[in-house]
Image: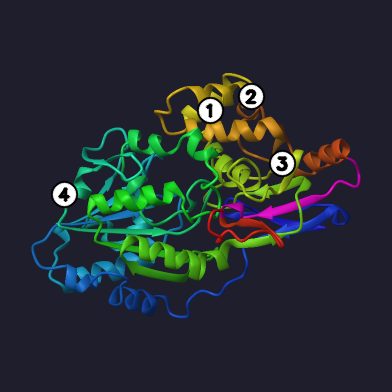
Amino acid sequence: MQIEMPYGTGLLPVEVPEQNIIAVLEPPGVAPVADMEAAIKAALAHPLGTRPLGELARPGIKVSIAISDASRPNIEKWILPAVLGELHQAGVNDEDITLIVGTGSHRPATPEEIAAMVGAKAGSLRVLNHSCEASPLVDLGRTSGGFPALVNRHFYAADLKIAVGTILPHPIAGYSGGGKAIAVGLSSSATISSIHTPQMLDDPRTGLGKVQDNPVVQFGYDVARLTGLDLLVNAVVDEKEEIVSLACGEVERVHRDLIEDAARRVYEVGFPAPADIVLVAAGHPKDNNLYHVAAEALAVVAGNAVQYPCVKKGGTIIVASPMAEGIYSETMFNYLSQAAPAEVVRELQAVRIDRPGMHRAYATAQILCQHEVIFAQTRLDPAIARRVHIKPMATVAAALAYALAKHGPEASILVVKNSHRLVPVIKGGISLTTPGN
């Protein structure tokens, strides 16, 4: 059976033995809103739990807008024109508006990426890349969970603070969006590291699709409120980055409402049982480096963060993603490559987590302790894969043949497409919305 796997911005056709396939998982087809411009205007006019943007803005004030980096869908191209229009109508001038790219621990956005998000205004607005290591910070104390809140000083100093972001499945926070735009996107290395720890990864309240009582979700809300975030604009989008649902207003109201009203419908998909072999493609833009593929392919189908593992213990995970950008996180790579996975797990459980990427090394090492992972038909240097205890293979066909020889001709295969947009749930399993899960 020929299956087209997402591969960068294109498709990779692969042949999978039809008799072995137990399911092909991909994001459910959900129609976008009929008129995105009208939907955005309606959301801005009727915010949840706060006044409309046109009433919050006034002439002479300084405005900061947090936007996502290129590892997230580009909803800014839809949202920013409407937000800027409201600000201009209220008398706010371009020179009083600063856009800050919430990079978290990621690389800076390139001029081309900024132009794609900001459009024609890229040349007339001040645009800053946040750096968790170098940007000026303000210390806002600690959250209700005791985590340090050090955030970008430029953003905090504004009179009116707005954040724009997308809600997507997240292997620790359940779903991204909400206060994470500030708490991670615009925070310090110390703040990011404090919440991305082995203890958080192993906490039964955290994990893919889990929001109820999730301490990482609460951390996001706390930091956003300490920062004085005035207005959050979040959206759920389809694979074409067209808006399925959006809302704006107070951070927790917007985040929780969108998850329950739209995100679960758009991202959660049922499957019958864990398989012997999982063929997974992370999907663009989460398939371009080792760091994101570890989080958005491996951690979606296996590991402690997954309530419903897609692969049996001892099973084989075949990843078909380009990873042309390489390692991305030297910290993650250095920890994974220095010792066997079991030793990496033991070491990171014992040391202080003080750099972003250590948590991803820990989670990946956990997966490697229980499963064989193959990177097939990737552009990542094979030597890099081998150093992190992953088997590189030239083609998906060769990887499937190898896995079937290992597990037997009757081995079950689960195909997972665009895993970064999925929360796999076993059919008839416990709902992720159930309190205590």
- The picture quadrant where one finds residue 322 is top right
- The picture quadrant where one finds residue 177 is bottom left
Instruction: Give the residue drawn at x 55%, y 43%.
Output: 295
Relative horizontal placement of residue 18, taking residue 325 as reference (left or right): right
Residue that numbered label 4 is attached to: 157
Using a 10 Å C-alpha cutoff, classify the residue at mark 1 as few (fewer than 14 neighbours), some (14 to 19) or many (20 or more).
many
Question: What's the amino acid at mark 3?
Answer: Ile
Instruction: Give the residue drawn at x 54%, y 21%.
Output: 347
Residue that numbered label 3 is attached to: 317
Looking at the rendered structure, the secondary structure element under dot 3 is: strand
Residue 412 colored in magenta in the image: yes
| Residue lying at the far front of the rendered structure | 436
Residue 248 vertical position relative to residue 363 in the rendered view, above or below = below
Query: Which of labels 3 and 2 is toward the front?
Result: 2
Relative horizontal placement of residue 349, taking residue 187 as reference (left or right): right
Magenta range? 408-420
Question: What's the amino acid at mark 4?
Answer: Ala
Q: Earlier in the sequence, mark 2 or mark 1?
A: 1
Q: Earlier in the sequence, mark 4 or mark 3?
A: 4
- Disc assigned to residue 342: 2
Query: Which of labels 4 and 2 is toward the front?
Result: 2
